[in-house]
Amino acid sequence: MHGVDDVDLARKEGKLAITVNFQGTNVLANDIGLVEVFYRLGVRHMLMAYNQKNLVGDGCAERTDAGLSRFGLSMIKEMNRVGMLVDGTHTGYRTSMEAMEASTSPCIFSHCNAYSVFAHYRNIKDDQIRKCAETGGVIVVNGLGEFRDDMEATSESMFCHLDHIVNLVGPQHAGIGLDYVKDVDGFWKYVDDNSDAWPLNNGKPNRHTKFVQPEQIEDLAELMCRKNYAESDIRGILGENFRRVCKQVWK
């Protein structure tokens, strides 16, 4: 698919529309020109980093908290030009804040939870949430239980993070992105085998928690109803908010 019109057509025809994203910018190999190449090939958003430092800036699991590099500034300018979403997920605090400041288009956090609710390096702080909302973007909550201190990955704990974001910046800036992994054992083996990218959290090892399952989205909708969320807000959180941002940014 190429744009939001293709997404709408797929929904109308009962089909699944798929976009591609990159978890980090290493694929650019110091070549800004590849941003447009990948966009033409279907890549619609790209993370600044994946937990570790790269040419753009620091990842969220790094020892340091360096800001956006000159290469990173040029890359964001090019992403804005071609219509690729700037995604702060997995990215260090300063790098994400400076990326959002540099972007002239709405930014996203495509699969993050709230640090104020549970302190994990993969979660984002309130001023990151506010800054994303200021760009007109969307903060999309994550389904992995480890990031919510929840071994069973319950709908209730995910809703706590969603509700925090809604109360902080409004329902129009919130969404749901499960970060769903079917091969859970394979995922945790990857984490255990890559301790530099996935270090201890506050001295505690990563626990092999479950992921929220796609069928739990119905539970999340029910929890929003119980909390007296407006129907229009629920629709927004379940996808219309992200659609709005994509419509603004994609070209």
Image (cartoon, rainbow, N blue to C red):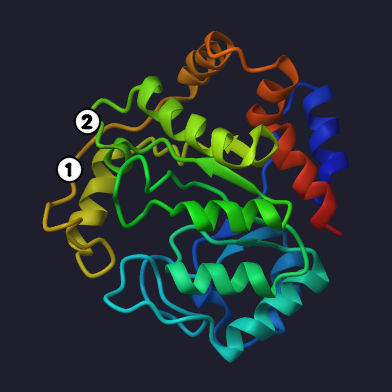
- Which residue: 54% across, 14% down? 227
> Tag 2: Cα neighbours inside 10 Å, few (<14), some, or many (≥20)?
some
Location of residue 42 in the rendering, given as x and y in whole percent from the top left corner: 72, 58
Distance from disc 2 to disc 1, alpha carbons, whole Å, reads 8 Å
Q: Which mark is residue 207?
A: 1
Location of residue 110 in the rendering, given as x and y in whole percent from the top left corner: 56, 49
Drawn side of residue 44 relative to residue 59, left or right: right
Picture mark count:
2
Residues marked 2 and 1 touching at CB (< 8 Å)? yes
Badge 2 marks a residue whose secondary structure is: loop
Position of residue 15 relative to residue 73, above or below, is: above
Label 2 vs 1, first from the N-terminus: 2
Kind of residue sitting beneath label 2: Met
Drawn side of residue 24 relative to residue 154, left or right: right
Name the residue tied to disc 2: 151
> Tag 1: Cα neighbours inside 10 Å, few (<14), some, or many (≥20)?
some
Location of residue 248 in the rendering, given as x and y in whole percent from the top left corner: 84, 52
Drawn side of residue 53 relative to residue 177, left or right: left
Q: Dividing the picture into quarters, in which one does residue 237 lie? A: top right
Badge 1 marks a residue whose secondary structure is: loop
- Which residue: 42% across, 28% down? 160
| 105 and 39: which is toward the camera | 105
Position of residue 233 relative to residue 175, above or below, is: above
